[in-house]
Image: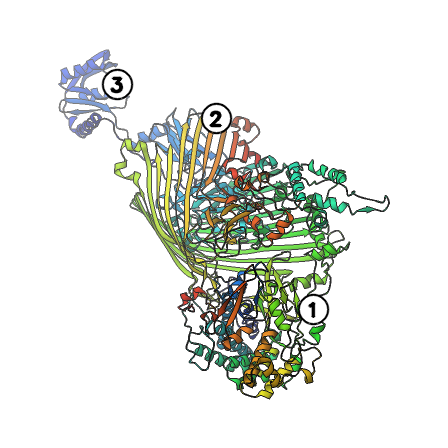
Amino acid sequence: MEKAPDQRTQLNSVEKVAELLTSAYPESNYIPFIETSSDNVEDKGPGIGNESRTITQPYYWLDNDDNNSDTPTAYWNSSYEAIAAANAALEAINTHNFGNAALPYKGEALLARAYAHFMLVNLFSKVYDPATSNDSPGIPYMTDPEKVVVGQYSRGTVASVYASIEKDLLEGLPLIKNSSYRVQKYHFTVAAANAFAARFYLFKKNYEKVIEYASAVSPGNSFATILRPWNTRYNTYTLDEMYVYFTQASEPSTLLLIETASSWARTRTPRYGYGQVINNEVFTTNVTGARWCYKSAYYGQPHYSMLKWNEYFVKTSPNATIGFPYTIVPVLTADETLLNRAEAYAALGQNALALADLNTYCSTRILNYSPTTHAVTLAKIAAFYGTTDPKAGLIATVLDFKKKEFTQEGLRWFDILRYKLPVEHKIFAVNGSFKTITLSAEDPRKLFQLPSQVTLSGVAQNPR
Amino acid sequence: MYKIYIEILCTHRRYIPKLLLMMKLITVVLLASLMQVSAASFGQLVTLKEKNVTLEKVFKEIRRQSGYDVLLSTNKIKTSTTLNVDFNNSTIEEVMSKIVSGGDLHYAIEDKTILITLKEKSVFDKMLSYFANVKVTGKVRDKNGVVLPGVSVREKGVANAVSTSGNGDFTISVKEGATLVFSYIGYKTLEIEVGTKTTINVTLEEDAAQLKEVNVVSTGYQDLNKKLFTGAATSLKASDVKRDGITDVSRMLEGRVAGVSVQNVSGTFGAAPKIRVRGATSISGDNKPLWVVDGIILEDVVNISNEQLSTGDPSTLVGSSVAGLNPDDIESFNILKDAAATAQYGARAMNGVVIITTKKGRNTDGKPVFSYTGNFSSYMKPSYSNFDILNSADQMNVYLEMQNKGWLNHSSSSRSANGGVFTKMYNQMYIYDPVTGTYALRNDAQSQKQFLQRYADSNTDWFDILFKQSFMQEHSLSVSSGTQKSKFYASTSYLQDNGWTVGDNVKRFTGNVRGNFDISDKLSLELITQGSIRDQRAPGTLGRNGNPVYGTYDRDFDINPFSYALNTSRTLTAYDANGNREFFTQNYAPFNILNELENNTLELNLIDFKVQGGLKYKITKDLKYAFDGAYRYAKTSQEHKITENSNMAQAYRAGISPNDATIRGNNKFLYRNPDDPNALPVSVLPYGGFYKTNDDNIVNYYVRNSLEYDKTFNEDHLVNFFATQEMRYIDRQNKVFDGYGYQYDKGGVPFIDPNIVKSNVESGFNYYSMGYRYERYLNYSLRAAYSYKGKYSINATGRYDGSNLLGESPTARWLPTWNVSGAWNIDTEKFMQGERVKKIVNRATLRATYGLVASMGSATNSSLVLQSMGTRRPYLGEKETKLYISGLENSELTFEKLNELNVGLDLGLFNEKLTLTVDAYKRNSFDLIGAFRNGGIGGEAVKFANYADMKSDGIEASLGAKVLKATDFNWSTQLIFGFNKNKITNLKNQPSIFGLIGADGGPLEGYAQRGLFSLDFQGLDPKNGSPRFINDKGEVSGDVYLQSDVVKYLKYEGPIDPKYTGGFSNTFKYKDFTLSALVTFAAGNKVRLSPSFKTSYTDLDAMPKAFLSRWEMQGDELKTNVPSILDVLEAQAFGSNYAYNNYNYSTERVADGGFVRMKQIILSYNIPAKYTKKLGLTNSSISAVGNNLFLIYSDKKLNGQDPEFFGSGGVALPIPRQFTLSLKVGF
């Protein structure tokens, strides 16, 4: 009678704990809804491109009521799935006497748990602001496996969620060991953990810590060697090569990759997306006086693409023509970490260090980069962004760089949240006229909506 | 089973005097004899000497001389009798002695009266007279020569009766000239005049009409006195429901049992019908009844779900273990329906229980009794006249119109993936003959017309080409032999079916040995060995995929002959003008169905072996212990052989050699190396074909101990206690292996291209897999039954079930179930004893039960369920194996449960001329496993949990009548009727539209267990004749997102399972001829018509005649609902709008599922004994049987589609019309 009905496995070895932790990352994609909610997209006009619900609804900042992939609900569900895997692993480590061999995995589990909660709290709760008490509702912070059909939970506050994340992060980070992973880029390596810590403290506006952890990502400050080589290697790639290599683990810039069930890689011709206007913006002359040497192509104008996404199609059977599309997403990169550090330096008034980081960044993105002609200076910033405040200017530069660098990667949304930026979306009519809809700075729609079934667990949805 | 237990007849009746007067006389005689001594002392003397004097005168003289009156109280002598007397002063005593001497007379003197009476016999005298009678001995057998114990042998008209012994022997003394009456339950009563014979051996004939009078009910655990049984059950004798020529015993229940529905979703050998006892009880779990053979639960080798049954997948052929039983071995069925009947099965009982009892050896005095059955069947070919398919001329006209609309033109048709006549025509224009300098076909209108003409005229009959008037033979030989203490039954059977289609055939062997041994009066032993072997061939097939994107069900390389004939254009020809096989194009490779059926085959082998033993020990007269154990071992293997000459293998290299850049770019079976973005697609199967195997094995142990106490107290109180403990152990194994590059034609050497393994690993597919499933069950149950005078019975059962299926949690796995029930035999009451009442109602029983039964749900996560998988990452170097949580621990997991209330009435009217059984029930299913959408915070947004509820109720009735009963002619009839409806009352799943509109329907709260839903058709678009519906957004549009979970705009059609089912059978007997006919019917369900509409068509497609009335120009939308054929530009504009596919799932494409079917007609002739004896046979009969003859009624919209059959391709074939000649011989 004690025999399991199938060949399910017991979590009774370090190896199995390690394999379970491969599931501890949210296998869902946030890009489709946060990128489309941001100001990095445009309406290409009626009748141009697809109007699938997963893209149209976030453009209008409408709540999506289904749980298909690429929706906030799907991200919510898979984040908690990842958390459940981390919690199951932690429970196994606590109940079995695995000894020191399990410690790196305890570290990974804590970091994975912290990461998933961090993404959830930023997407579904109010942004953290050290100037306030952060007592608005957070998201349930799960530390134990659920063992009943419907558990009862509390959202806590943004502050309490951040405190829990910080606790897990600080406890887990020292335990991480790169050699414990088979495929490092899909796990929290030391670099990835530090990059995540840098991002966490940036959101928390604890800038010293940002600098500390960001610097740990590239010991010896050799960021230049691990940034995306836009002006060298990428520049020589064919289009096919470009979108194969961008998300490969061999890219030095990627710090953490997650395979996500997402049709984002095939969302090449949406009506609301990366179009002519944004493409022009990306390729216009920037603060350096040159243009970014990104690679952009189109699937029939005005459907532009940075060729970042390569779909992995999981067929339902070997001969099938149908299946599930997957998109590999680099969720943490060296490029973001460097810009996060630059922002931290700027926020602390360490302008020279900020400029140094920005110029390291530019050196990989301008064709035939020359420090003498292309270097970013405070003067150039003041002229380009029309501000004499070096801090504001430097931060404007960072945000501008990030907006363009992470086109079609979604990270712009977090800057909109952190700096409480309003977003305007134009809606074009057939005759070319348009109306503008606005997401104001403190708009409640900046918080994505929790799935309606959370009320079963005693959890309230966001106000609308 | 029926024959062994009978009521003990009362043979010692007392002689009750008829006349009161005579009793008084006896009193007088009694007094007289007491006075006899005293009378002797009187001393009166009589003197009389005379010859030939009458008694009357003698008496007068005595009175005159002595004053004594003489009274004669017997007619044994008359007063006119004369005698010679010579008395001289003789005393009265002397005179009287003289008078009564020589007869059985006796005299007594009282006062002054002498009474002459018959003499009371002494014991010795009685014995003497006994031996003076005729002593008759003999043996009673049935027609098979099996001795019958317990037969009542009675002397007619006299209180004199005996029973036959265990050897069937009897001895009885009767008067000369007596008549013996032999009677036995289930047999016709026989009267034989003794005459001068002293040995009378008789053979009793069975009497089908008496069948109902079974007074033992088999529950699979025990054989219970019927007086103590209170449940709803139907017993069937196999010989009465046997359908000669039907190989699957489960189909014998069709139309025979009220409340049991049998749906023939596929007619292929081995594919189980969909059987429901009282409808469905579970939403996500099993709804199949439990099969119990000789007391042991019969496990299926592969557990086939409800939906899988209709997919046509190869595993459906091994799903039914019942297919391994020889129909001739079956003695009886007993179908347990309500909670009282199934109570002993506790947590396995929710779906009803079918108990099969196989034949046992009988006492034949050691003489072997053989029985042979031979069935010779032929399946009728289907015919286009029954279906609604365009002939080749009409079809060609549609193609020509398509050509005008831009389809089938040169550029799109040549080198297309799939193409018929047009593709062939355009391709021929490229075939250049360097010798003659010409092309195979000139590119001009005249040549084209000529080319097409041959095909327009072809009118190919695919049914004729692919189907055969097949021949199936079935031989079964059994022998029964035994003595009083040892009995054997052995049988073997062989079945060979040459196949209805050119792609299938089957052979089956069965063997069965059963021995019963009475070691002592207390100990008996039973041993059973059963085995079967099956060899079957079917068209090669891959699994079916539901495609919610387009709204279709896909099966790659489907070569199911039935589907092919229905879906392939009749313009195509199987042979060219020279008589060679003609190939068209599929998957860019040459295709001919006959070639493919030879080169793409599925071979199925099955070995099933069971040994079983039972031991019974009588501890005391009333207390019995029994042990039963069984071991079963079954191996099934499917070999899918796809040779290098098959279309499927060639599709994997189309476009490579000869190199064709267009095909190479488009062929989905070629491999694109993800590591080399700039490389051309290559073949991963440059040589050879495929060799795929799929093995399913089962090992099953069963052990049971039981204790039964059965006693009757003071003749009035019947008590039965039954306690049992049972253990079941089942291990199932599944192995799948895909071999690549096997060269069938080159010595069987594989050529493996490493890329095929690489491509599979990259896509996340395994080329082999193996897995185990384990089931362990332990349970204890107790049943107590009590009956008072056979008038009132009550029954209570409790069972405690344990199973590992819910997971490792020790708390979730146990479940108690219980049941109470009662029966009231109204006919035993005083008020029913009146002569008049008895004439009308001779039997009446009212039953009622309430109880809880359960079933194992589909969820197994009472503990955390971790499964392993490969990560879904594109590059080999980045893949790793991972564990994932496939089910969080659910500490609240439990069994699925059902509370049932059943009330039943059994009536026998007009001395059993009319019998009626009616049952009504109400069932509440609860704790059903359902998909439960939750907030996802625990990490599983859709959980399978025990929360769903379903209600069902129904009525079932069976009415039997002996309409006519004359000496030579009998007519009996039986009507079976069942009604069941169910409704899901609580289910919070979120099905997609596609999950509800398919032929299998889907579950949704507020509707039937499986409801069929449709897109609400809103007429044709006046612009282009495309269909429109209310879509998932509530708008009128052709574009419906089938994966949407907004289902509120769908229209509910009805349940997919029939609400009403039943059968009507009639049997006519005239002398030795029997004619019987069975009609089955079902109603109240809806069926989806086969999909036949698409956005675009190729020149391979066959179209239904409905296309002739399609939308062709604006305004037609007012006249027709058949959508147009789009032109190329319009079709392109449709893009991802699958309006035409959606039309297949609309309210327009639904028909009523009700039907009335002439299921079977049998004409049989019992060859009279005078002929059979000459051949040395004890009996023989010959029958002509027609099965599945025709539909008396079905919805016209079906246009030839069988309302029961799901045309899903694969290995599924409809049930054929079949004629059988059946021969039965006993010797």
Label 3 crowd (10 A; few <14 / some 14-19 / many >=20)? some
Assign a secondary structure to mark 1: helix
Name the kind of residue labelled 2 in the image.
Answer: Lys
x and y percentages locating residue B1043 in the rendered image: 53, 56
Q: Is residue B886 visible?
A: no
Residue wearing tag 2: B1071
Camera-nearest residue between A392 and B993? A392
What is the residue that sits farthest to the right in this orientation?
A: B435
- Quadrant of the snapshot with the C terminus of chain B: top right
Where B819 sits versus B846, above or below?
A: below
x and y percentages locating residue B640 in the rendered image: 65, 52
Residue wearing tag 1: A241
Label 2 crowd (10 A; few <14 / some 14-19 / many >=20)? few
Disc 3 + disc 1, Cβ < 8 Å: no
Assign a secondary structure to mark 3: loop
Camera-nearest residue between B368 and B541? B541
x and y percentages locating residue B423 in the rendered image: 71, 46
Camera-nearest residue between B697 and A214? A214
Q: Write the residue at 34% across / 34% down.
A: B909
- Mark 3 or mark 2: which comes first in sequence? 3
Name the kind of residue labelled 1 in the image.
Answer: Glu
Instruction: Please state which of the two labelled residues, at mark 3 or mark 1, is closer to the viewer.
Output: 1
Residues flagged by tags 2 and 1 on a common chain:
no
Q: Is residue B1028 visible?
A: yes
Q: Write the residue at 27% across / 24% down.
A: B104
Decide if residue B749 is on the left or right side of residue B180: right
Q: How many marks?
A: 3
Give the CA distance from mark 3 to mark 2. 52 Å
Name the kind of residue labelled 3 in the image.
Answer: Ile
Decide if residue B599 is on the left or right side of residue B266: right
Where B655 sits versus B1099, above or below?
A: below
Q: Write the residue at 60% across / 74% down.
A: A404
